Image (cartoon, grey):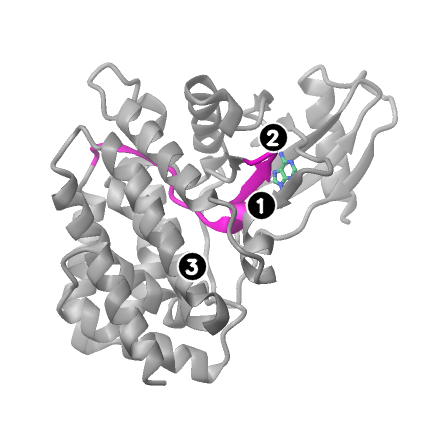
Amino acid sequence: MSQDLAERCAELVAELGLANPGTDVRIRPLTGGVASDIAVVETEQRDVVVKFALAKLKVAEDWFAPVHRNRAEYAWLKFAHDTCPANAPKIFGRSEALQGFAMELLKGEHVYLWKDRLLSGAAPDGEAAKVGGLLGRLHAVSSRTDFDRSAFRNRDDFHALRLEPYLSFTAGRHPDLAMRINGLAEALHGSDQVLVHGDVSPKNILVRDGTPILLDAECATMGDASFDLAFCLNHLVLKALHMPTNRDALCAEAQSLWNAYAPHVCWEAAADLEARTVALLPALMLARVDGKSPVEYLDETGRRRVRTLSRPLIAEPAATISDFIDILKKQARHQ
Ligand SMILES: Nc1ncnc2c1ncn2[C@@H]1O[C@H](COP(=O)(O)OP(=O)(O)O)[C@@H](O)[C@H]1O
Ligand SMILES: [Mg+2]
């Protein structure tokens, strides 16, 4: 760990009153992410997790993003904790000067990362439906006219963190689909119906005693609900393609995520949102192969499989999630 990170951690917990200035704190970096410095800090009062945004992300392609997204993340965590206290970590304060914040350390025998469980091949434990219900509730509350949007006018950050690296960059590698993919990006950029988390990935969801806890909200912005849905479904369908023995279970999880989400949709017709979600999903699949943040577990054969499935569905989207899943299963059987 860099000296610099240790110093920033000590400064942050002192500034937030979580440790007395000058006392020893022990620091253990956490891994998994590409966009931040994140560490467990043990103080004499309690153990906390601290997180600072990085200016340049840890990926192969050059990818820069403004560090003030740390403020948006903290505001999202506060909103989520106020709205669904069991589904977000407790927060302990933020420093504007250090662009860092502190939160509850989630640990224990009954805590696991959803991604680890999905990749282990173990049967799902209903996580997707719980995540769908949670997302639906957060989106619905944030769609109300009295929702305070002031911390979430972040469409330019969202562009830098999501639309450019996932969609525009991928459009550049698939010129025949560029109009469609760029059209999706433009529509997302122009939309502001609900508070979008922006990184609803199984690696950002810890499950504690059967309850999903959503982390890592630095892309948070007012936007289109279809982004969070398609982003999370993408992780499930990519794993379904990749793991034949779990395919049916993962496809069922994808469907149950939507089924649990749909009853919350009160800001538009659920069928319209579902249609936008299935139109975006194949573009995000292709982005995890040819965009700036490629999936680590696919080899060239796996990548080719993703292109073969996603490209025609970008050109001509499926009508519903159920249709999308049927097409995926049919194609997977022929490989
Ligand atoms: N409050 C927390 N308690 C325990 N583990 C955490 C906590 N926050 C994050 N983590 C772990 O650290 C990893 C990286 O954190 P995350 O917020 O996702 O950062 P990044 O933006 O770098 O992806 C997560 O995948 C999770 O495993
Ligand atoms: Mg993360």
- Dot 1 or dot 2: first in sequence order is 1
Q: Position of residue 30 (x, y in %)?
A: 69, 46
To which residue does mark 2 refer? 98
Residue drawn at (87%, 22%) of the image: 23
Which secondary structure, mark 2?
A: loop
- Callout 3: 10 Å neighbours few (<14), some, many (20+)? many
- Crowd band around label 2 with a 10 angstrom C-alpha radius: few (<14), some (14–19), many (20+): some
Residue type at mark 2? Answer: Leu
- Whether residue 196 is in magenta: the answer is yes
Residue at 76% x, 48% y: name it.
Answer: 2
Q: Which residues are magenta?
A: 192-210
Residue 131 within the segment the image draws in magenta: no
In front: mark 3 or mark 2?
Answer: 3
Can you tell which of label 3 and label 1 is closer to the viewer?
A: 3
In front: label 1 or label 2: 1
Tell me whether the residue at label 3 lies in contact with that at label 1, contact meaning CB atoms closer than 8 angstroms: no
Q: Using the image, determine if residue 274 lies above or below residue 144.
A: below
Q: How far apart in space, not on screen, are marks 3 and 1 (Cα)?
A: 29 Å
Decide if residue 172 is in sight here.
no
Picture quadrant where residue 102 is located: top right
Q: What residue does disc 1 label? A: 36
Q: Residues within 10 Å of mark 1 (few under 14, many from 20)?
A: many
Q: Is mark 1 within 8 Å of ligand 1?
A: yes
Query: Is residue 282 shown above or below 320?
Result: below
Image quadrant of residue 5? top right
Reading the chain from its start, which is encountered first: label 3 or label 2?
Answer: 2
Q: Residue at x 35, y 74 (%)?
A: 306
As drawn, which residue projects farthest toward the right?
A: 24
Q: Is 333 above or below relative to 93? A: below
**Residue that carries the numbered disc 3 in the rendered image:** 250
- Whether residue 104 is visible here, answered yes or no, is yes
